[in-house]
Every structure is written in C-alpha cells, then in structure tokens.
Image (cartoon, rainbow, N blue to C red):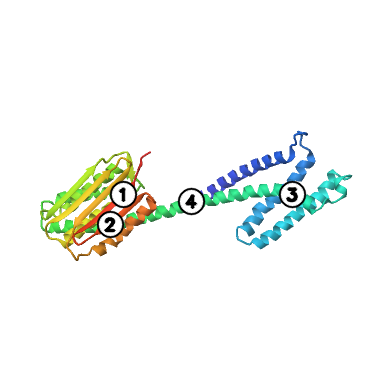
Amino acid sequence: MIQQRRQKTRFSKELIFQVLLHILVFIFYAIDKRHRTVEVYQLSFFLNYALAALFSNYFLLPRFFYKKKYGKFALSLIVVFAATIFMEEGILEKIYFPDTRGKFFAGIIFSLIDVVPVVAILSGFKFGWDALMKQKEVETLQSAVKEGQLQFLKSQVNPHFLFNNLNNLYAYAIENSPKTPKIILELSSVLRYMLYECQVEFVSLLKEVNQMQDFINLNELQIEERGEIKIKIKNIQESYKITPLIFIVFIENAFKHSTASLTENIKIDISFDLLDNGILKFICKNNHQPQSNTDNLTHGIGLENVRKRLELLYPNAHQLKITSDENWYEVDLEIKLSKKP
C-alpha cells in the first residue's frame, strides 16, 4: 500500500515536470521575435516531435537503453526518427503547405536539423529525471543498509556486556556479598540505557560519558583492593552529540585484560577530554602481565565491531590508535563531533 502511494506520488511529480517541460520547449520552438503569435502548424509539428520523444522516453529507454541493449536502442531510434520525418514531410507539410514545402523533400539533413534538437531536449530531461530518481533510490538503499548494519552491530554489544556482568553478579550472590544490591542497581541503570536510550543514532555526549562512568563503577567492583582505577573527565558538554556505545568495548577489554593477567597492582586509566575544536579525545590505558593475550584483544570481535561503527558514522572524522608493549595496553581515540541541532 505504501509502495503504491509512493509510486503514485512519483508519477504525479513526473507528470507535472513533463507538462511544464513541454510547454517551455514549445515556447522556445514556436515563439519568434518578429511574429509573437503561435500558428496551428507549429503546434502540429511540435506534437509530432513530442510523440517521438514520448515513445523514446517511455519505451526505448527502459526497454533497451537501461538494459544496456545499445544496438537495439540505436536501431529503434533510427526508426523513430524516420517515422517522425515521414510524418512531417509526407503528411503535415502537405496539409499545411501544399503549394510550397509540401511539393518537395528538403533532404534528410535538413529534416534531422528540425527533429533532433527538440526530441533530444525532451529525451535528455527525461534521462536526467530517471537518473535523479535512481540516485535517490540508491541513497535510500544505502541508508537502509547502513542503519541495518548499525543495529546489527549494536545488538552484538548488549549480549556480550550482559553475559560478562551476569557472571560477576552470580559470583557475588553465591558469596552473599553486601555489594550485590549495588551491582544490581548499577547493572539495571546501564542496561536501561543500552536497551532503551541507545536506539537512536546519536545521544548527547554528556549522557554517554555519564553512563560510561556508571559502567566503570560497575566493573570496578570486581577489582576491589587489587588495584587502582583513575577516571578523568574534562570539558564534557551537553551540546555535543555522539553515537552511543563506542567506548564500552575498550573499557570492558581494559578490565577483562588486567584482571585476567594480574592478581594485584592493577592499573587502569581512563580519560574523556573535549577539546576546543570539537574533537573528543578518549584514552583507555591498562597494565597487564607480559606474555598475556594482548594480540587476541587487539583482534577481538568487539573491537572489530567498534571499528566498523566508526567507519560508518565517522568516515574521515576519527583516528583510532592502539598500542601495546610488555606491560601496557593503550587505546587512543579521537572523534570529530558535531553539535546537536
């Protein structure tokens, strides 16, 4: 039903465009500076050209040219021009000019000079219209594909996050830890944000950073007294927007990597800094034990997920640098943000 409505709207727009175009072309064709009146024969001749253009536009173009059957298109076009010239020279001129032009044939070249310009203009505009509509269809399709990719990538984040934190919650519950209610509240807050507020393409930068801070607090519970977590938030503003859940994988990897390879002296430094030029600088740095699984983290599914989202939403507007040595793993991400409308 919606598709039919769109087709009707498109047909109505094209019909109006074609009517206005034909009127405009006819004015240039028929009106003369010396004789500012339109003769009946001019209208008849123009209608002959318009019929040729109509046949070319709505039969030859879609049936041959758009299907890349260029040979058949050229032959058919020759037939159309021949029929148009025959109509003009063999019938119309004999009707309107029986004693002058209707008595002789001026030749193919002179006839083509009359026919080709008008038909070419009318067909050219039709070709341009079709190209414009096709471009809009391509843009709509690309937008749908892009949105589908983003939704798929987001859907990969949520189960991954939930799985890891439910394991932590289970461990605290088994021990009857007094921290269990706090974990449930933190988890509920972050999940609410991920499931309900992250369905849009962009959220406010302030909201995203605040949620990441809650996420860090949630993960910090598993470290307890075994290390130190530093968070630095500078110049974060509500007026800027960012795609949600960009930083969560880096933060989660930092905790996972450090806690898996170290039993004490865990160090994780995370900073968000919005520069004056609208560039957000995010740094996530964690220590780890030598010979740990750094390579696996660098090429993990979650990281590849983030890379794809950055390429889709911030093409040529971000820089991601990941470095690792025997003791430290560091993510340095810069994103050029825009302000909310």
* For the residues bearing labels 2 and 1, Cβ distance under 8 angstroms: no
Question: Looking at the image, is mark 3 or mark 4 earlier in the sequence?
Answer: 3
Kindly identify which residue carries mark 3: 115
Question: Residue at the location (64% across, 40% down)?
Answer: 20
Taking the image as shown, residue 260 lies to the left or right of residue 295, namely left
Indicate the position of residue 109 as horizontal and vertical percent values. 78, 52
* For the residues bearing labels 1 and 3, Cβ distance under 8 angstroms: no
Taking the image as shown, residue 9 lies to the left or right of residue 326, namely right
Indicate the position of residue 302 as horizontal and vertical percent values. 29, 59
Q: Secondary structure at mark 1?
A: strand
Q: Closer to the camera: disc 1 or disc 4?
A: 1
Q: Quadrant of residue 31?
A: top right
Question: Looking at the image, is mark 3 or mark 2 earlier in the sequence?
Answer: 3
What is the C-alpha distance between the residues marked 1 and 4? 28 Å
Q: Amino acid at mark 4?
A: Glu
Kindly identify which residue carries mark 1: 334
Q: Quadrant of residue 295?
A: bottom left
Q: Quadrant of the C terminus?
A: top left
Q: Amino acid at mark 3?
A: Val
Question: Looking at the image, is mark 1 or mark 3 earlier in the sequence?
Answer: 3
Front residue (pair 326, 278): 326
What is the C-alpha distance between the residues marked 1 and 3? 60 Å
* Disc number placed over residue 322 in the picture, else none: 2
Q: Amino acid at mark 2?
A: Ile
Front residue (pair 88, 55): 88
Q: Secondary structure at mark 2?
A: strand
Question: Looking at the image, is mark 2 or mark 1 earlier in the sequence?
Answer: 2
Kindly identify which residue carries mark 4: 139
Q: Closer to the camera: disc 3 or disc 2?
A: 2
